[in-house]
Amino acid sequence: MTHRPAAWHAATVRSVSRETASARRIEFEVPTWPGNDAGAHLDVRLTAPDGYQASRSYSIASSGDSRRVVLAVDEVPGGEVSPFLVHELQPGDQVEIHGPLGAYFVWTPGDERPVQLIAGGSGVVPLYAMAELHDREQDSTPFRLLYSVRTPDDRFFASELEQIAARGRLEASYVYTRAVPAGWHSAPGRVTRDALAAATWPVDRRPRIYVCGPTPFVETVADWLTELGHEPRAIRTERFGGG
Amino acid sequence: MKLDGNAIAGPLAEVFGRDVTLAVMTCSGCHESAVIARAMVYVTAMGSVARCPTCDRALLVLGPGPGARIRFSMPGVSSLELTPDEPDAA
């Protein structure tokens, strides 16, 4: 892991694009950025004209030495920061960012153990960064993703994940909680313990497991993984909430 | 709102000058150790409390101080272990 000190940086918006009906992808140019490991996050700080400041944490979808930093932000209605990022922020605007943060929830290539990614909703962002790095570096570690999301249209990085899977670099399974595609094998519903066991690496493969999502999702999944026999220290979790 | 130690990586980096989510805290109540990322963190408008994942004791408290200052205390931590390069703890 490269040493990349956390600091405040001025980030200029280079582009914005629709990610889903409620989320936006934002690409920043950060000339002083030291790069970041896959899975790291940063804090975005907004300052109002009257000096009031609000900051929120967002996982970084990009990784490596690039000065380009990509976020995918889901709007939390009534939130202090995410509605501004999703609706107001425009190319050329500047925000303050603090990072890279979070040396715990990162994956670095070169490890033999298979990797299991488990995402709830927008919690897929840091896990996408890991899958993208794994693909880009041609790393040989087997990767699986289990992604729980409301509907197919709510998937973040849907086409990118499909492309990585099509190259044989990721086995991706989806669980849809609100609406399923035509002909899907099951009715909409939350992940169950049996579905989790069926879609993830068995215990004897000793996977490194990364779980990211809303707190109830993460805690339910982490408890089931422990019950299934995975080592608690091999399960890395990141909870999010607020906007 | 209940989160985990990842959520206070930013404010803690302001205090320590670096990312400390892999620093190991030992709880002064139950003497169990865990990396900061595994602490249970409760975030409110008044600040954040990181609690021991084993016994729920308040380990760290972070909040706004006067002006732009950060107020930070470690009421439940008997020791904090930091490695110079933060190698992978697993």
Image (cartoon, coloured by chain):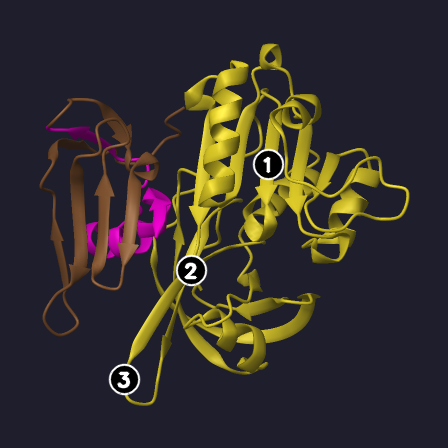
Chain colours: A yellow, B brown
Q: Residues within 10 Å of mark 1 (few under 14, many from 20)?
A: many
Q: Verify whether residue B21 appears in magenta.
A: yes
Seen at 68% across and 71% down, the residue is A17
User: Given the image, what chain letter belongs to the residue carrying mark 1?
Assistant: A
Seen at 59% across and 36% down, the residue is A118
* Residue that label 3 marks: A51
User: Looking at the rendered structure, which numbered label has been put on residue A118?
Assistant: 1
Q: Position of residue B40 (x, y in %)?
A: 30, 40
What's the residue type where badge 1 is placed? Ile
**Dot placed on the residue nearer the N-terminal end, 3 or 1:** 3
Q: Position of residue B64 (x, y in %)?
A: 17, 65
What's the residue type where badge 3 is placed? Gly
Q: Verify whether residue A138 appears in magenta.
A: no
Q: How crowded is mark 2: few (under 14 residues within 10 Å), some or many (20 or more)?
A: some
The residue range painted magenta reads B1-28
- Tell us which disc is closer to us: 3 or 2: 2
* Residue that label 2 marks: A242
Mark 3–mark 2 Cα distance, whole angstroms, equals: 21 Å
Q: Position of residue B24 (x, y in %)?
A: 24, 31
Seen at 43% across and 21% down, the residue is A232
Seen at 60% across and 10% down, the residue is A204
Report helix, strand or loop for mark 2: loop
Is residue A1 visible to us here?
no
